[in-house]
Amino acid sequence: MELEYEHTWEANVNFWEERWSLGQTGWHNQAVNENLQRHHHVLFTEESPRILVPLCGKTLDMPWLSAQGATIVGVDLVAQALKEFINEHNLSVNETTTDTLTHYTNDRWHLIQGNIFDTTADQIGMVDAIFDRAALVALPLDSRTKYAGHCLSLLKEGGKILLITYDSPVADNQGPPFPVRNGTVERLYAEATSCVQIDEIITHKADDQRLQKRNLDWSRADIWEITK
Ligand SMILES: C[S@@+](CC[C@H](N)C(=O)[O-])C[C@H]1O[C@@H](n2cnc3c(N)ncnc32)[C@H](O)[C@@H]1O
């Protein structure tokens, strides 16, 4: 079944640009993701890894990863997201444009405005690790396989992905975030050397305002360690 914002690429771009311009960014947290804090060691197999944060928005997970010693490569479709991030964190960056991408860079940061699928290894370089929170689950269902392959194409051999997916009692096409059912991640990352679920957090409606607002009885976050 087609999703409303999936009909055309333009509609998808408009959907996200509108969410940002209307301030409808309910996914954005004022705190660093707890699962990242608990499992960040997955991403730090070396002291100063270059970490890709696909579909980054202006997540506070990026400055936190930077403070742990990482160089950050953040990619988002919407210029407003990156501009707000740069302003709010007082980053001094150079702006350059190549083909379809706009790059904001300094020696610790590489923020890229553009479609994640346009960020080839030639354009942005390989990364040591990828942190995926609210990225896979935000993409149209029919681009998931392509997305997983794309992430692996940007990751060096032996590199790690720390992935967070969500499941809840909603239809497959109800989102974003779109639910990720049992068996999906293993299938998407079948080309990886290993794909292991390392944690599971179940939240119940009574304990969570977001679930109450969406009238959902429960949701489950699954945490994955994927090795290329
Ligand atoms: C649900 S938000 C998650 C943001 C961030 N990961 C976080 O945890 O706060 C998804 C973000 O992906 C961006 N986005 C959607 N489609 C994209 C695409 N094809 N390429 C790059 N960014 C995209 C949107 O603009 C939005 O900021």
Image: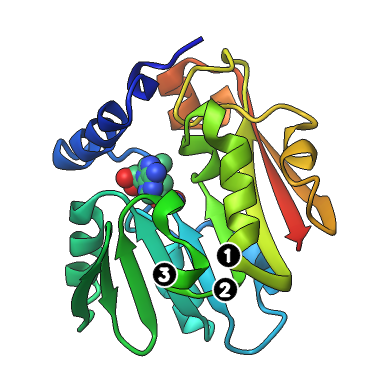
> How far across and down, in percent of the image, does residue 140 sit?
48, 29
| Discs 2, 3 touching: Cβ within 8 Å | no
Image height check: is 156 above or below 151? below
Residue 112 left/right relative to 128: left
**Residue visible at 19% across and 75% down in the picture:** 95
In the rendered image, the residue lying farthest to the top is 1
Quarter of the figure that contains the C terminus: bottom right
Structural distance between the alpha carbons of marks 1 and 3: 10 Å
Q: Dot 1: few (<14), some (14–19), or many (≥20) neighbours within 10 Å?
A: many
**Residue visible at 27% across and 57% down in the picture:** 100
> How far across and down, in percent of the image, does residue 207 sit?
55, 31
Q: Which residue is mark 3?
A: 123
Structural distance between the alpha carbons of marks 2 and 3: 12 Å
Residue 113 or residue 16, whichever sits in front = 113
Sequence-first disc among 1 and 3: 3
Residue 191 left/right relative to 9: right
Q: Which residue is mark 1?
A: 154
**Residue visible at 78% across and 37% down in the picture:** 187
Three-letter amino acid code at the position of disc 3 = Gln
> How far across and down, in percent of the image, does residue 33 sit?
52, 57
Q: Which residue is mark 2?
A: 127
